[in-house]
Amino acid sequence: MSTPTETFPPLPWTEWKDTCTTLHLWTQIVGKIRLALSPMMNHWWQVPLYVTARGLSTSPIPFKNRSFQIDFDFFAHELVILCASGSVRKVALKPRTVADFYEAVMSALQELHYEVKILTQPSEIVDGIPFEKDTIHASYDAEYAHRFWRVLVQADRQLREFRADFLGKSSPVHFFWGSFDLAVTRFSGRRAPEHPGGVPHLADWAVREAYSHEVSSAGFWPGSEMFPEAAYYAYAYPEPDGFKDFKIEPPEAYYHPDMREFILPYDAVRNSENPDETVAKFLKTTYEAAAELANWNRAELERK
């Protein structure tokens, strides 16, 4: 068990992987509702969730001349639908199947007269089960869900500080429910070569919209079956020559050849004497690897 005062609590993947998998699918249901109703923005910036003081939120979603938002509350362990009219509906976050959660959320929206249909096939997940048919994933450990949110709060703060030094085009710090990670992206301002696509259950044209321009991206994710470890990450698209061999900090960080990303294990951060400084070094040097090797106009893009 972690303590309430622990700023960077332990988050071992093996201890909460079932909850993490279920929560990932629940966030996809909520994220797809936002996707279905929100006007298109560049790089799909209209679809992510945002870290809040209690969990994760869609922010206001338009519906005709009304609006509502959906929040994950990891204190009360509720999904809260808040309407601009003042109406509220709640769905308990507890051990329950994805199918049951999907039905509860869609029923609550219907009660509020928000008619919305979503693609129920999970995105970016190999062999994903349509939400209404998924009776397999049903885990929810409240302690670990709350702990995950606490880590996101710290990562969100660190990424916001990093974002502030950049004058060029930059994304918000936002949580992508497809890949289940918190991310911030800097742009060189130049178009990128067409992305090859190939992401599971994500159309190639959608991936190409996300990577239409050169980027240096960084963030945090809790781990997965393929990479069972929480970590900070950083990558460049397109990856410039020499990127993987660029000297980065801190010493615990490394280049993962299969994922084509720099990795900083979360445990190296939480066990360091100065976690914020450790992450700041990682974000700074991995960005420099992208910007220097790809000849970004750093004098125009960075705050002195």
Image (cartoon, helix red, strand yellow):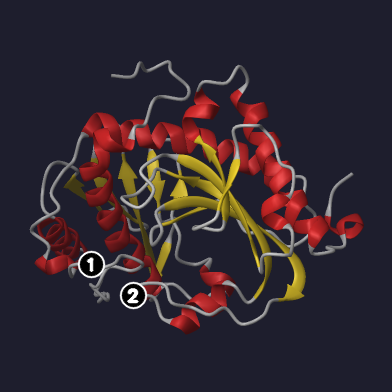
x, y percent for residue 2: 33, 19
**Residue at position x 23%, y 72% in the image:** 120
How crowded is the residue under tag 2: few (<14 C-alpha within 10 Å), some, or many (20+)? some
x, y percent for residue 139: 15, 44
Q: Is residue 208 above or below residue 173?
A: below
Q: CA distance from mark 2 to mark 1?
A: 9 Å
x, y percent for residue 252: 59, 32
Q: What residue type is disc 2 on?
A: His
Q: Looking at the rendering, which quadrant does residue 31 occupy?
A: bottom left
**Residue at position x 89%, y 44% in the image:** 304
* Quadrant the N terminus occupies: top left
Could you say which is closer to the camera, residue 270 or residue 45?
Answer: 270
Residues marked 2 and 1 touching at CB (< 8 Å): yes
Q: Secondary structure at mark 2?
A: loop
x, y percent for residue 262: 59, 48
**239 horizontally vs 26: left or right:** right
Q: Which residue is label 2 attached to?
A: 201
Could you say which is closer to the camera, residue 258 or residue 149?
Answer: 258
Which mark, by number, is residue 128?
A: 1
**229 horizontally vs 274: left or right:** left
**Residue at position x 83%, y 63% in the image:** 296
Count every numbered label the image shows and give the total: 2
Res 224 visible: yes
Q: What residue type is disc 1 on?
A: Gly
Which mark, by number, is residue 291?
A: none
Q: Is residue 169 above or below residue 195?
A: above
* Sequence-first tag of 2 and 1: 1
